[in-house]
Image: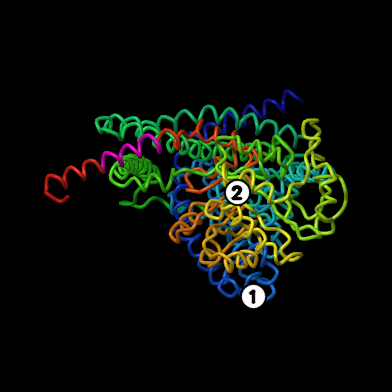
Amino acid sequence: MNSIKSLIYRESMKESGKIYRKTGIPLFALLILFGLARDYIFFPLMGKAWGLALSTTPDGFISNSNIITALVKSPWIIPIGAALVIVYALLSLWQITAIIVGIAYTRSGENVRLGDLIKISFVQLQGNFKPRNWMIIVYSLIIIPMTNIYMTNDILSAFIIPEYIQDFIRSKTWLAVLCLIIVIFIVYIALRWLFLLPAFVLKKKDFKYAKAESKTITSKVWLKNGINCFIYSFIELIRISIIPLILIMLPVTVCYLFMHGFRYASSLFNTIGLTIGLEMVKNVTGSLVGISIICFIVELYFSGLAKHGIDTGIILPKPADAKPGRISFYTLCKICIGVFAIALAVFYISTVSLAQTNSSFILEIFGKTDIIAHKGYSSKAPENTMPAFELADKCKQADYIELDVWSTKDGIPVVIHNSTIMDATGVDEYVYNCTYAELRKLPAPYNMSAKKFRNARIPSLEDVIKKYAHSTPLLIEIKGFEQDPQLPAKIVNLMKKYKCEDTSMIHSGNYKALEAVKMIDPDIQCGLILAVVTGSFYDLPYADFFSIEHTFVNRSTVSNLHKRDKKLYAWTVNYSESADALKFTGVDGLITDYPEDIIDYYTDTNDLVNNVIHNKVVKILDDSRAKTAEENYSKGNY
């Protein structure tokens, strides 16, 4: 029996390989067209619709601080949001349906034009989209993103949980175990429903019957199916990545050789070209591997049908015969690939030319990113204590030290993160119910066992400012404004007392606290902290910058803020994956518990800040100024 199962998997791999060789590139061209339609038609229209919904809210945007008010006062938010989620799910399903339909036609020996494939896949999806099949929406929004079964679907390619929520889950053992159980259950469901979409699309079965058929086929082999899919995807990743690597990097090499005669552009071009080229290799490879995996899943589906004696017939309309004068599917694929390669080469050449004539372009994308030590060097010492600030102050990579401030019962601003002192001292009490003298008696290294921190205490803000504000600027977060409305004034007075109001900054999740600061001194830089945000929040008058959870940071948001001469700092960036997602966004700062590790990651993998910006762009600027001065001198303009 085991030998028969192994034979089925080997035959499925063999057949899926044959189908992939026939459909891989055409279906990749299909993904490009879907991507263009999504980015330039559907998403802009969905953005306009969501913008209209947000315009009915009191503030014009939704964040973690005003979400309840927005939902209560704007009746359009929930229905429009729900409608957009459904459209979002349908777009992802349409893309996957088109791939499955294309594979099915290839298996049957049929040739289909690209336009017909898109039309037929839409008709197949539309015919099955009935009220009783509403669970397919849930499946596409939860199971697919969390398990990433269909890797080609870059709309729902990954399920992202904000990092601060991940950290909170890790800090609670029971919650971490619960989440692990949920994830295992979802993976199990995904493997049992592995053939749900092929049955739903190709046999036009309702969700209930498609699910039942998938469970029948995967009975007793669901785990083996998952293991074989993983092995197959790993093999295909290695095999397929070679071709895109050659196709993408060849234009880079050719353009580099062509541009090598340029005086300063070659090294800059090489860095930018290789970085972007490798990123594109990753995206192209991911799409092609995803197509190959779907070929394998479809083959396993038909093998499973035959094994269980289930009818293998499918319901697909016969594609229209090719008409004279029409461009064939494969010709269109060749045109797409050719245009893609030419566009890539033009992009590289234009990037270098622009870098030579307008260095602000490079500074905008690859400009200096500030590294902000979150709660001091909190990964090496107890957070928000003098040892953590001492380490951050000595860390050459840290441009700012971030800290949190609450008021004590007797009105003294102290540095601590939470409203309770439990995490810092082990005592279950609120900060604002304790006097400063009482807090000073409690050791603060409760979350670290190292003996060298046993004398750490909760410090006053004045002690921190007095010792560190002139060597490393501070980013002070105001907390507990509701408990002490005078806290902003106390912080500003301390900044003025020690003359650091021009270098240090203030941010808060409470916009009224920023307003209070600006009423005292409008020149102090203030920022609004946002954990979740959508809409047009850029023009808030009392916010000079924004500190946004990094999951919600993108190039568009950064650009909109930069147009208004405002900055964006991303928090809390503790992992290389998080930093990688922020590359090329133009973000102004990274708030992190690991200042040395994050900057090392940036310089090791990107080498743009130190190598390109400081050496190449500055050199281009100097030479440009020298040339301009020489021309003015020769013309007598001096």
Q: Residue furthest top?
A: 3
Left or right position of 561 against 549: left
Q: Quadrant of the N terminus?
A: top right
Residue 489 falls within the magenta-colored stretch: no
Name the secondary structure under disc 2: strand
Choose mark 2 or mark 1, whichever is in front. 2
Name the one closer to the observer, 490 or 347: 490
Q: Mark 2 or mark 1, which has the lower sequence index? A: 1
x, y percentage for residue 583?
50, 43
Left or right position of 242 against 468: left
- Identify the magenta region: 613-624
Q: Residue furthest left?
A: 635
- Residue under the image location 49 percent in, 54 percent down: 558
Q: Residues within 10 Å of mark 2 (few under 14, many from 20)?
A: many
For mark 2, what is the residue? 474
Task: Kindly identify which numbered label has been placed on residue 250.
Answer: none
Name the secondary structure under disc 1: loop
Residue 223, picture quadrant: top right
Relative to 299, does residue 85 appear above or below in the rendering? Answer: below
- Residue under the image location 49 percent in, 60 percent down: 42
- Marks 2 and 1, how far apart in space? 39 Å
Type of amino acid at the residue the image marks with label 1? Ser
Name the one closer to the observer, 39 or 419: 419
x, y percentage for residue 159?
65, 47
Q: How many marks?
A: 2
For mark 1, what is the residue? 74
The reply to whether discs 2 and 1 touch (Cβ–Cβ < 8 Å) is no
Type of amino acid at the residue the image marks with label 2? Leu
Q: Residue furthest front?
A: 497
Name the one closer to the observer, 25 or 502: 502
Residue 623 falls within the magenta-colored stretch: yes
